[in-house]
Image (cartoon, helix red, strand yellow):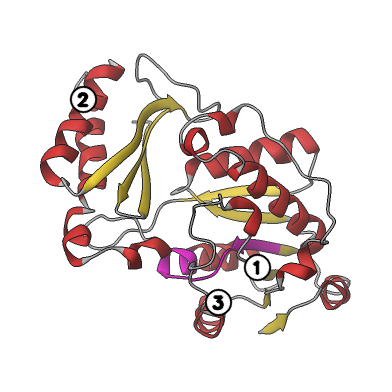
């Protein structure tokens, strides 16, 4: 497996890389990321190339968020990528990605105004800008994203559509711990008591999905089930949002139907955890 840390070497690599499957990450990798790399490897087969980026993007962190303390674990990340089947890792410093006097960025004005974007203004503009740059640098044919950050996945799909990137986007199911908690680099911030309560996020979502399957369609009732479960099973948590939305537009819905999504974000002290569940069947 090859490690590349600057743009000139990346461009030289790309000239002979052939078909590329790309997995963009911010590092601090866990088995959820390994699943994305393995999926890319599966899609690539023996002939195509799997590339992973490891870059903690400063543009998607707000002024009071955890950019400085976000884990940097390149050596362990490299080992995970290689074991999962990656052929190349692009791990540039910030100066290789952004000029100090940069003045251009991508703005998203619809899908990013709800859910996580409502309380993190500018976050998804930073995501779009870095992913667009990485797509331009790596020039992948296909790219793999996890469904845990469903809003990010929807926004990247919209960006690819609106800006005509020749990249096929694949969404991969969320990887979970044995107790249902979605794997996240931020889980390491949880105290023992918080970690014990965090699986309530998944349990609350499943409870609402089961109610929908049983005939409950009203948004207020479905979301009340989640509020009640979290209040009881995760008293250390503080809700940021709980919403019923359309999977593609992310706009709020009054009635759940196939193609809906219930998404939530909950703070445990400074650790902000997200999760979601699709209502499809």
Q: Is residue 263 visible?
A: yes
Q: CA distance from mark 2 to mark 1?
A: 40 Å
Asked if the stretch drawn in magenta spans residue 25, the answer is yes
Mark 1: which secondary structure?
strand
Q: Quadrant of residue 130?
A: bottom right
| Residue 20: in magenta span | no
Task: Quickly name the residue at label 2.
Answer: 224
Can residue 217 be seen from the camera position used here? no
Q: Earlier in the sequence, mark 2 or mark 1?
A: 1
Q: Which residue lies at the image location 66% right of the left edge and 84% below the top edge?
A: 1
Looking at the rendering, the stretch of residues picked out in magenta corresponds to: 21-35
Q: Is residue 190 above or below residue 106?
A: below
Question: Measured from the top left, where is residue 168 in percent x and y?
Answer: 69, 48
On residue 87, the disc is: none
| Tag nearer the camera, 1 or 3 | 1
Residue 211's spot in the image, x, y percent?
19, 27
Position of the C terminus by quadrant: top left
Q: Position of residue 5 (x, y in %)?
A: 74, 78
Crowdedness of circle 3 by 10 Å Cα count: few (<14), some, many (20+)?
A: many
Q: Give percent across and percent down for residue 11.
A: 86, 71
Q: Please name the residue that numbered disc 3 is placed on.
A: 81
Residue under label 1, please give it. 53
The one nearer the camera, 192 or 217, is 192
Marked residue nearer the N-terminal end (2 or 3): 3
Residue 155 vs 26, above or below: the answer is above
Instruction: Classify residue 141 by image quadrant.
Output: bottom right
- Asked whether, in this view, residue 278 is left or right of residue 17, the answer is left
């Amino acid at each position: 497996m090859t490690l590349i840390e600057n743009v000139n070497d990346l461009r030289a690599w790309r000239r002979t890389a052939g078909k590329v499957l790309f997995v963009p990450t911010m590092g601090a990798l866990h088995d959820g990321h390994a699943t994305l790399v393995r999926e890319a490897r599966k899609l690539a087969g023996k002939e195509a190339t799997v590339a992973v980026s490891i870059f903690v993007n400063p543009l998607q962190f707000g002024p009071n968020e955890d950019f400085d303390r976000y884990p940097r674990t390149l050596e362990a990340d490299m080992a995970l990528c290689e074991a999962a089947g990656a052929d190349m890792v692009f791990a540039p410093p910030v100066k290789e990605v952004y000029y100090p006097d940069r003045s251009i960025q991508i703005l998203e004005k619809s899908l990013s105004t709800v859910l996580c974007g409502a309380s993190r203004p500018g976050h998804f503009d930073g995501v779009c800008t870095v992913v667009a740059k990485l797509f331009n640098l790596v020039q992948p044919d296909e790219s793999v994203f996890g469904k845990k950050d469903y809003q990010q996945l929807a926004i990247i799909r919209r960006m690819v559509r609106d800006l005509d990137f020749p990249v096929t986007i694949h969404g991969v199911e969320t990887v979970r711990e044995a107790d249902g908690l979605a794997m996240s680099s931020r889980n390491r911030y949880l105290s023992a008591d918080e970690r014990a309560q965090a699986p309530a996020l998944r349990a609350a979502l499943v409870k609402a999905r089961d109610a929908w399957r049983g005939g409950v369609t009203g948004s207020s009732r479905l979301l009340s089930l989640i509020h009640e479960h979290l209040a009881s099973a995760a008293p250390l948590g503080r809700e940021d949002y709980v919403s019923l939305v359309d999977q593609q537009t992310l706009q709020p819905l009054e009635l759940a139907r196939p193609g809906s999504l219930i998404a939530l974000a909950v703070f445990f002290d400074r650790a902000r955890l997200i999760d979601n569940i699709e209502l499809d069947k």
